[in-house]
Amino acid sequence: MAEDRTRGIGQLIRDGERSFSFEFFPPKDEAGEEQLWRAIRALEPYRPTFVSVTYGAGGSTRDTTVRVTGRIAHETTLTPMGHLTCVGHTREELRGILASYDAAGVHNVLALRGDPAGGPGTPWTATEGGLTYADELVALAREVGGFSVGVAAFPEGHREATSLEHDVQVLLNKQRAGAEFAITEMFFRASDYFGLVERGRAAGVEIPILPGIMPITNLNQIKRMAELSGREVPTEVVARVAAHEDDPVALRAEGIAVAAELCEALLAGGAPGLHFYTLNRSKATLEIFAALQITV
């Protein structure tokens, strides 16, 4: 964990001890904003390496994402990272958004191509005057200057990749464009993460790859999320959690146990840290921390 907000996230991960980070999404209304800040305040004492705020489809939450990350920068001790996608923006608009982040005191971005305008699984069409690939967005952020840039990685391969080898070449291209670290989408088998790392290292990917952790507190919700990524929750995980489907409390506890065991395996195997998808709530993450004996 780290407190130095003058260094970029890529440097913090390389220089520090194990990295712990949290992801939030922009609130839709005042009640959502209150919930978000309760989660942020509850997790702040754990001194995460950074926290990130997602970016809505087609740039729909652009202003809220910039505002929330800016507020985190100015009102907390946390290092914020804003997300940015190619979808729905021209190159010049993207430059403007990066300038907005900079003005808000946010100097770390996660550069993503983003889902097609028609939703996951539909054909990708670039915005006229915009960018087509995430590595182009990485290069643009580096060109603008002053940003530490992260990217996405996919333990089971991106749904549009023709093979796992093709997928890791895409990650290598993002590194070559200037990416300093990567964060994976959610997964549930440690072997999938370590397989990605092994393929990446063999291909020349040297940047740290943080595993993305999604606690299972609602099995149907997680299944839908996996489906959007073109994946399925492993049958052994579904069977283990679904065994408690008549008892929501027991189901949730089993889901937390699954995530904690995954985290233990990842850290024991040499993962540089853990990135938690919080869904703007702190309780599940704090329960995993308790299981891992991570304290304030």
Image (cartoon, grey):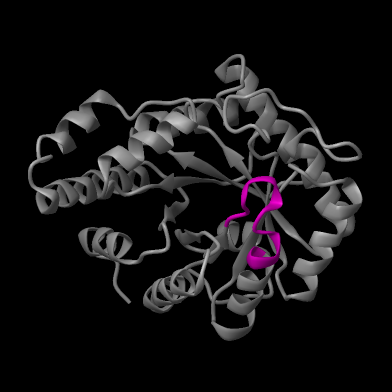
Viewport quadrant of the C terminus: bottom left
Region rendered in magenta: 54-65
Q: Is residue 6 above or below residue 115?
A: below
Q: Quadrant of residue 106?
A: bottom right
Q: Is residue 206 above or below residue 30?
A: above
Task: Classify residue 136 as left or right of residue 281.
Answer: right
Q: Is residue 57 magenta?
A: yes
Seen as rendered, the residue at the extreme top is 162
Q: Is residue 138 magenta?
A: no
249, 234: nearer the viewer = 249
Task: Classify residue 82 as left or right of residue 243.
Answer: right
218, 5: nearer the viewer = 218
Task: Classify residue 108 as left or right of residue 153.
Answer: right
Seen as rendered, the residue at the extreme bottom is 75
Question: Which residue corresponds to the image point at 37% horizontal and 26% vertical from the top-left?
Answer: 232
204, 156: nearer the viewer = 156
Q: How many marks?
A: 0
Question: Which residue corresponds to the image point at 52% horizontal and 59% vertical from the top-left?
Answer: 25
